[in-house]
Amino acid sequence: MRSERIGGFLMEYGANSIVTPAPAAEALVTQLGLDPEMVTRSAAARRRYLVRRGRMRSLPLQPHRFLLSDFFSLSARARMLMEPFIPVRHDDETVADFVRRRFGGELLEYVVDPLVGGLFAGNPAQLSVCAAFPQLKRLERCAGSVIGGVIKSRLQHAVRPAGDPGRRVLKSFRGGLGTLPHSIAQHLAGRVFLGHRVEAVQHWADGYRVKVRRGNGALWTTAESVIVALPAYAAAAILCELDQRIAAALAEIHHPPLAVVFLGYCAQSIAHPLDGVGVLTPAIEQRSVLGMLFSSTLFTGRAPPDHVALTAFIGGARQPQLALLKPRELEALAHSEVRQLLGGRAVPVMARTRCWSQGLPQPGLDHAHRIREIAAGAAEHAGLFLTGNYLSGVSAATCIQQGLDTARRAIQHFAPARARRRVVA
Ligand SMILES: Cc1cc2nc3c(=O)[nH]c(=O)nc-3n(C[C@H](O)[C@H](O)[C@H](O)COP(=O)(O)OP(=O)(O)OC[C@H]3O[C@@H](n4cnc5c(N)ncnc54)[C@H](O)[C@@H]3O)c2cc1C
C-alpha cells in the first residue's frame, strides 16, 4: 500500500481499495483513529465494464438481469442454467477447468478470465480453484451446485438492505491506502526500524539472529522470535540459511511482473462518462491492459477539478513481458487503450508508472502442497512465524486478518516463557 499526491492527483502504487466488511481491518482502522479519514466508493461508480468485440459493455450484477442480458449468446445462457445438473467433482482443478465444466466456455472467457486478471493479474488455466476461489468449490461440494448453493444462502440470509453492514463495500482513505501503513508506523515510532533490509535469519542460542542492512552498513540483532511478513520470494531469500525446505517451497511460488500506469486527463478529453469502478479485458480480446480503474470516479478527491484519473494494469501472468517495458512505452500502451476504449481525445496531462517486477503470488495446483511444506518446516523452528499474501490470499483485508492472527500466535509463544520467568522471579 503506497499512495502519492502528484499535483492535485492521488496515485496508488499498489492496492486501491479494501473490500468491507473486513472486521480485522476495520478494527485496526478504528484503533488507529483513522475512521474520520475513511472514504467509501462513490455512488457514481455504479457500473462494472467488460470488453467484448472491442467494445465496453456494462455487465448487470443481479443474477436475473445477468442471465437475460444479451452480453452472452443464447446457447451460453442455456449452458449456464444447466449448472445445477452438472455432477460434483471433489478434487482440486484449475479455475478454467472448474468454470468450463460447470458453466461452459463463454462465462469463462468473458467473465471469469477478466476477473482473474483483475484480482490476481493471473491466468485461470494456471490457478487452483481451491486456492483462488475456495468458496466456489465449497458451494459445489456442500450444495451440489454453485447456483443452488447461492440461492440457498440468499434464502437463509434474505436480501440485504442498502445500509446492512454485511453488504460488500469498497473503502479507502482520503489520502489513499498508504495512510494505513503510515499511521501504523507513527503509532510504533521508537519501537520499529524503518528502511532496514533484512538479509538473513539464523539460529542463535535459544532464538535467532537477524542480519539487517541500512545503506552500506550491516548489523546483526538477536531475537527470541521472528515473524517473517515479506513476500514469498523475499522470505525465501532470507530463510535459505535457516531452512532449505521452507526456502525452496517459498521460492517456487510464481510472482509474474505487473505494471501500474496512472494517467491524468482533462475531463473533457475523455468521451466515456467513466460511470463505473472500471473496465476489465478478457484475454481473448487480445488487448494490452488487464484492465483500468476509473480512479477519480471510484473515490472522490483523486484528481483536480475538471480532470479525471485512470489506473491501468499491464502484464501479470497473461503478458508478463509487457510489464517490463520502459515507463514511456507503458504509458503509450495505456494511453492507446484509453483512446480506443474510452474515446480519449487528447494526451494525458500527467503519467506515472510503477513496475512490480514480482507482482502477486499465483496459487497453482501445487499451492496447497507448498503451503503444507512451509507450515511443516516452520513448526520445526520454535518462535518462527510466517505471514503474507501467499498464505492468506491476496486481498489486503485478509492479509491484515492473518497478520493479526500471526501476532496472536507469537504472543502465545511468549506466554509460557513469561510465566516461567515469573516463577523464577
Ligand atoms: C498493483 C497492485 C494492486 C492491488 N490492488 C489491491 C486492491 O485494490 N485491494 C486489495 O485488497 N489488494 C490489492 N492488491 C493486493 C495486496 O496489496 C497485497 O496482496 C497485500 O498488500 C500483501 O500484503 P503483505 O503484507 O503480504 O505484503 P506486502 O504488502 O508486499 O508487504 C511486504 C513488505 O515487506 C517489505 N520487504 C520486502 N523484502 C524485505 C526485506 N528483505 N527486509 C525488510 N522488508 C522487506 C516490503 O517492502 C513490504 O513493505 C494489489 C496488489 C498490487 C501489486
Image: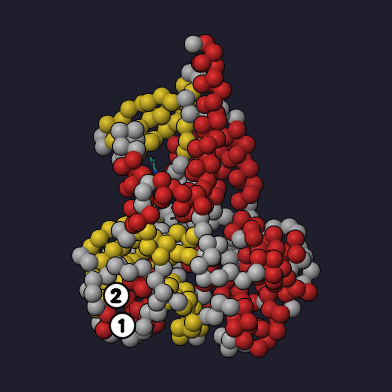
Task: Using the rendered image of the protein, determine whether residue 122 is visible from the camera's viewpoint.
Answer: no
Asked which colour scheme the image uses, the reply is: secondary structure
Expressed as whole percent of the image width and height from the top left, the position of residue 144 reads 77, 66
Q: Earlier in the sequence, mark 1 or mark 2?
A: 1
> Which residue appears at 34% of the width and 40% of the height?
187
Report the residue that reaches farthest toward the left.
Answer: 7
Ligand 1 neighbours mark 1 (CB distance < 8 Å): no
Callout 2: 10 Å neighbours few (<14), some, many (20+)?
many
Secondary element under disc 1, as helix, strand or loop, is: loop
On residue 308, the disc is: 2
Expressed as whole percent of the image width and height from the top left, the position of residue 288 reads 42, 73
Q: Quarter of the image holding residue 70? A: bottom right
Verify CB contact (< 8 Å) between mark 1 and mark 2. Answer: yes
Q: Quarter of the image holding residue 275? A: bottom left
**Type of the residue with mark 1:** Ile
Q: Is residue 260 left or right of residue 27?
A: left
**Type of the residue with mark 2:** Val
> Which residue appears at 50% of the width and 49% of the height?
24
Q: Is residue 103 left or right of residue 300?
A: right
On residue 46, the disc is: none
Number of marks: 2
Expressed as whole percent of the image width and height from the top left, the position of residue 158 reads 65, 69
Expressed as whole percent of the image width and height from the top left, the position of residue 160 reads 58, 69
On residue 270, the disc is: 1
Disc 1/disc 2 C-alpha distance (Å) = 9 Å
Callout 1: 10 Å neighbours few (<14), some, many (20+)?
some
Ligand 1 neighbours mark 2 (CB distance < 8 Å): no
Locate the N terminus and report the quarter of the image it occupies: bottom left
Task: Using the rendered image of the protein, determine whether residue 169 is visible from the camera's viewpoint.
Answer: yes
Q: Relative to 30, does residue 171 appear above or below in the rendering? A: below
Which residue is more in the foreground, 412 or 6? 412
Secondary element under disc 2, as helix, strand or loop, is: strand
